[in-house]
Image: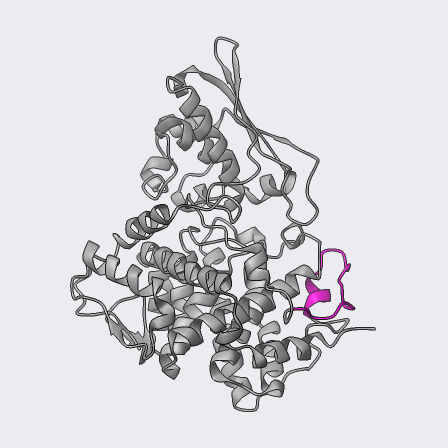
Amino acid sequence: MTVALTRDLAEFVVTLTYDRLPPKAIAIAKLGFIDATAALLAGKHEPCVAILKRTLNPVPGDATLLWGNTCVRAPDAAWINAVATHALDYDDVALSAHPSAVLVPTILAEAQHLGMSGRDMLCAYVAGFEVWAELQRRDTGQHHTKGWHPTGIFGSVAAAAACARLRCLSLERTAAALSLGASQSAGITANFGSMAKPLHAGHAAHAGVMAARLAAEGFTGALDALEHFSGLLMAVSPSGAVDLESPVDAHQRWRLVAIGLNIKKYPVCYCAHRPIDAMLDLRAVHPNLEAKDVERITVSMSQRNANVLRNARPTTGLEAKFSIEFAMAAALTVGRVGLRELDDTFVQRLSIQTLMKRVHVIFDSREDPTTGYAPFDQVTVTLRNGDTIQSSQVAKARGSASRPLKEEEIRSKFMDCAARSLDEAAAATLFDKLQGLEEITNMAFVLPAQQVSGAAAIPLR
């Protein structure tokens, strides 16, 4: 018998309160706000953000745009801010997607408009994440292999759930919001490595805000839009093997706690992170290793991940985010893969372009059907003199939920990202405020007036 998924998830959202949240869920949700804000501050100056902002030409409102001194309507703020958050692909990963890039800009924008508290925001984040997780767990197939980008496919529903929680919608109207979010699902993997990928996150954020607003006004949607035989789950399923019978257990389980967030150490596609760790480890063991000594670099990984890393010969920083060849060339040549390396000039260096041609991928057929990853990734370097050196087997990337970054590393990433938009004092103030988000009651804290951009203040109301 098919479960009443849409309605049951709506009931979970309606009944969720901050007091019910486990302390660990609160801590992880705050980490999501911190890391997404860092990614936004680093990505706000990217061309895709400027184009979207110019095209939308948003009118004044009450939601902060790009952590600047301009406020616009919440739907537009969520849209533009989410694109900025995902623009550099430096935001967190979970559920085979990028939940915080969608949820955080959505919640920040609508919470400002509604005058909600930090606790309301954290509760909304958990609501959105748990709805996302409940949908994702019901299909063990890899949506990426079908061409779907889960961030856009499920993000719109999760964002709708978060906004419904903020608005305290009734059961029927929350269900309608989820249904409307489902009808706005979008995002294909063929657009990875282009401006369209962060647009998936932005569209999902905007869709979530609008879905809840429409539902609040009485706009209806099918009350079985998620579980119907022609509903969201079946429509996007790679094989049609969807669990439509097990009950919703979001009331008993906290998947945010069980799964956690994977915080990116490198601003590239997450599929490249384990090989980057492997190459950097190898370089640390062999500090005299230089590109001129290398005949061949062999990367062992799953075919699914290799397919996602689709750009074998990138010429721009945007393309390089989805290139295992670039990741290996940068890691070996300069010993890092950071924001400064994701630059067109660096990608086009003759030494980088030459070394990329020596990178080859072999497929590990032991692919996890749920994650799409091999049991581990490994890098082997064949030298010109015939010698071969091999990295350790990397099963968990640095920054993953099971191999988390230290607190000082999280702060360091935040400050490095924020340096593109704020001075050090303003960035430190913002970091501290986000760390204590649950203590914010009036959503009206203001940062010091020392932004790099020269704005007078950054309100969050």
Q: Nearer the viewer, residue 85 or 257?
A: 257
Boundaries of the magenta span? 232-249
The reply, left or right, for residue 382 in relation to residue 266 is: right
Q: Nearer the viewer, residue 180 or 59?
A: 180
Quarter occupied by residue 71: bottom left
Q: Tell me which secondary structure the magenta stretch mostly adopts.
A: loop
Q: Which residue does the image show at 50% across and 50% down from the upper left?
A: 262
Can residue 217 be seen at all in this image of the molecule? yes
In this rendering, the answer to whether 250 lies above or below 150 is below
Q: Which residue does the image show at 38% across and 27% down from the upper left?
A: 333
The reply, left or right, for residue 197 in relation to residue 443 is: right
Seen as rendered, the residue at the extreme bottom is: 218
Q: Which residue does the image show at 79% across and 73% down from the upper left?
A: 2
In this rendering, the answer to whether 6 lies above or below 312 is below
In magenta stretch: residue 237: yes
Q: Quadrant of the N terminus?
A: bottom right
The reply, left or right, for residue 176 in relation to residue 345 is: right
The reply, left or right, for residue 248 in relation to residue 35 is: right
Q: Quadrant of the C terminus?
A: bottom left
Q: Position of residue 49 (x, y in %)?
A: 36, 61
Q: Position of residue 335 (x, y in %)?
A: 37, 30
Q: Which residue does the image show at 28% across and 51% down from the upper left?
A: 415
Q: Position of residue 11 (x, y in %)?
A: 63, 80
Quarter occupied by residue 393: top right
Count of numbered labels shown in the rendering = 0
In magenta stretch: residue 279: no
Can residue 200 be seen at all in this image of the molecule? no
Q: Position of residue 385 (x, y in %)?
A: 48, 8
Seen as rendered, the residue at the extreme right is: 1
Q: Nearer the viewer, residue 316 or 243?
A: 243
Name the image colouring: one colour
